[in-house]
Image (cartoon, coloured by chain):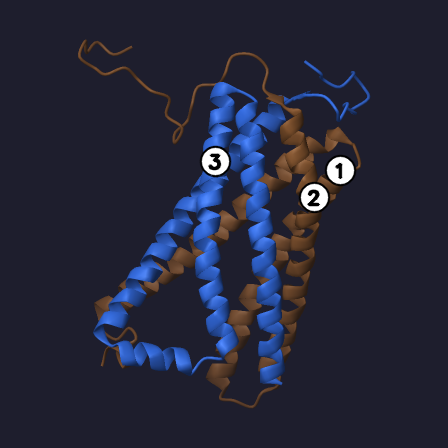
Chain colours: A blue, B brown
Amino acid sequence: MNAPPPGTGERDPGRQLELSEPEVARLRAAEGSARFLARTGAVGFGLLLLFLLDVGLRNPAALINAVNVQYPTIVASGILFVVAGIGAIALLWGYARNVTAFFVRGEDALARAFRRIRHFVILWTLVAALTALFEFIAVLQRL
Amino acid sequence: MSSNPFEPPRTMDLDGEAARAPGPLVVSSDALRELAIAAPWVRALARFTTLNAVLLAAGLIADLARSHGAAIAALGVLANGASLAMTTLLLLALRRYATASLRLREASAVAVGPIISAQASYLRLCGILAAIATGTFTVRLVVGIAKGDFLAWIYK
């Protein structure tokens, strides 16, 4: 509907925009990648949790000892990554589902999809900030 | 169409490849607003990722400078080097995403295409890295369990 005038390449930002075929293809690719990332992450975290549960049940003292020999920042960074990773999986899955719904039902779902990806970016920004802090402390400890 | 008269009515499957809605696919003003307000966060994520890459490089230098055993030092260098390479790749995709988001914020709606493209590149890269990490972990787990020596010091 509000396609750019031929030859200008600019579109009015205050109005709705019609996606071109290459943009639709890229959105489908983003949807597929988000779904794949969410599934792979779920499998990875699932295996990790099963592994930790197995070790914790068989020999909890050794697990506690293995944690104690690490720098606290490395342990904190690992716990943060797992907790945030579970949240990220849920947000990415929501993004993929809403992009699919956009292709089926229309425009409302795309705003929800972009909200999920915004929340994912906010979550990952906080993770990156805390990881940077932990890395900085770890580098100081190593020097 | 199925010939089974007892087949239940089909519902929309949101987890698989879905049929396309009739008519043009339109990005609403709400969706555009979501993309625009994400811009500062994308830029912040790119900056913190840059900081992490710098700190990983510093850690790499610290590992090289330390006088531990050659095998432990090599392992540290390998782990930090791999993390640094992955972070740099993610950073390239993120910078494209941040640049396109900021262009949209500056009322250039033509940036929607590059934002979607950058999202796709970033998510694809994250997916590849997650698959490599999960695959490596799974292979190590399976081989270690099969050989009976995986983390034997923990299972004692």
In depth, the one of A110 and B115 nearer the eye is: A110
Q: Which residue is mark 1?
A: B105
Label 3: how many Cα within 10 Å (few below 14, some 14–19, many 20+): many
Q: Residue at x 39, y 60 (%)?
A: B136
Label 1: how many Cα within 10 Å (few below 14, some 14–19, many 20+): many
In depth, the one of B99 and A14 nearer the eye is: A14
- The secondary element bearing badge 3 is classed as helix
Asked if one can make out residue A32 in the rendered structure from this viewpoint, the answer is no
In depth, the one of A60 and B119 nearer the eye is: A60
- Tell me which amino acid carries mark 2: Ala
Q: Which residue is mark 3?
A: A96
Look at the numbered discs 2 and 3 and tell me whether their residues touch, using CB distance below 8 Å: no
Please report, as a chain letter, where disc 1 is located: B
Q: Which picture quadrant has residue A115? A: top right
Look at the numbered discs 2 and 1 and tell me whether their residues touch, using CB distance below 8 Å: yes
Q: Quadrant of the N terminus of chain A?
A: top right
Q: Mark 3 to mark 1: distance in Å?
A: 24 Å
> In the displayed structure, would residue B48 be above or below residue B144?
above
Residue B151: percent from left, percent from top: 30, 75
